[in-house]
Amino acid sequence: MQLPKKTVVILGGAGLLGSEFARACASEGAHVIIADVNYATGTALARKIGATFMHANIAEATSLKKLVSEIKKKYSTIDGLVHAAYPKTKKYGAPIETADADDLLKNLDLQLGGPLLSTRAFMPILNKKASVIFLSSIYGVAAPRLEIYKSTKMKGVPAEYSAIKGGTIALTRFFAALLGKRGIRVNVISPGGIFDNQPKSFVRAYSQKAFIPPGMLSPKDIAGAVVFLLSDVSQKMTGQNMIIDGGWTL
Ligand SMILES: NC(=O)c1ccc[n+]([C@@H]2O[C@H](COP(=O)([O-])OP(=O)(O)OC[C@H]3O[C@@H](n4cnc5c(N)ncnc54)[C@H](O)[C@@H]3O)[C@@H](O)[C@H]2O)c1
């Protein structure tokens, strides 16, 4: 057990990556709190792995206030906070040339503002030695290969995504500097593309750039790093970006 007696909150814990993080943390002995807007999936998963589900919207200050106060009442402090929520508008992913201006800005707001707002909300209840993990992407450190989306019906990489993911890495360093004095560590993981039934032509084109086959990753490929960063083994590691991409960005 690498996370015995730790209380870990996974924002977006009902999602593709978040649910695997929740399973991995629970199997390493942590008490997991899944906080998500998806009540049905979140409660079902929580029941299955012995976690707690709390309904919360990371982009709304009032919802965050309620979540933090509920957690404080029940657990007093937490040992880990993982940002795996992925809020987006309905039109998210429209081409930059034609995307609605308000929509572009709203996604910046949700996906960069959400983690910023939620980290601030949790600051008072982070234990000394707590670990915070942000989620960026290979597109936070490298330019997207636009051509790999061309032969598919996939929307491609939105301009906001590059800005959000680059900003997430910068935000990690800010919070690492701010919270370091309290012994709190803040790191970010930048995963490569996760396989989620994308079209074969995309998977083939994407995979050509990776060193380690298969090119696309599974959520399990990232969960080990989450456990490592939450555990005491990494207690001197802060402000760092762990790129897990099979060599795609090299
Ligand atoms: N899937 C990938 O290929 C990939 C690759 C690199 C990075 N990432 C990053 O990992 C993170 C998670 O991605 P994912 O693929 O697991 O997404 P996902 O859509 O599968 O899951 C996101 C979860 O967030 C929840 N959510 C949405 N809006 C919310 C809100 N306002 N408040 C609380 N919860 C909310 C959803 O209900 C869902 O359970 C994102 O930051 C994404 O950019 C994903």
Image (spheres, helix red, strand yellow):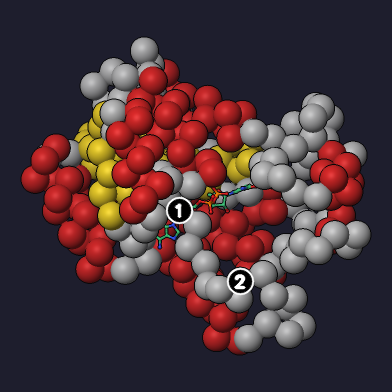
Q: Earlier in the sequence, mark 1 or mark 2?
A: 1
From the Cβ of disc 1, is ligand 1 less than 8 Å away? yes
Visible in this render: residue 10? Answer: no
Coordinates of residue 186 in the picture (x, y in percent): 41, 41
Within 10 Å of disc 2 (Cα), the crowding (few <14, some 14-19, many 20+) is some
Q: Quick check: 105 above or below 178?
A: below
Quadrant location of residue 99? bottom right
Picture layout, residue 23 above or below residue 77: above
Q: Look at the picture and state if 121 lies above or below 105.
A: above
Q: Residues within 10 Å of mark 1 (few under 14, many from 20)?
A: many
Disc on res. 214: none
187 with respect to 98 (left or right): left
Q: Nearer the viewer, residue 152 or 221?
A: 152
Q: Give the residue at mark 1.
A: 85
Q: Amino acid at mark 2?
A: Tyr
Along the line of sight, the residue nearer the viewer: 211 or 236: 211
Q: Is residue 197 above or below residue 2?
A: below
- For this orientation, the residue located farthest to the left is 73
Task: Tell me residue 48's x, y (percent).
Answer: 35, 30
Mark carried by residue 92: 2
Residue at (14% x, 53% y) in the render = 69
**Within 8 Å: ligand 1 and the Cβ of disc 2?**
no
Mark 2, secondary structure of its residue:
loop
Q: Residue at the top extreme?
A: 1
Name the image quarter holding residue 152.
bottom right
Q: Quadrant of residue 158?
A: bottom right
Q: Secondary structure at mark 1?
A: loop
Q: Nearer the viewer, residue 204 or 225?
A: 204
For the residues labelled 1 and 2, the Cα–Cα distance comes to: 15 Å
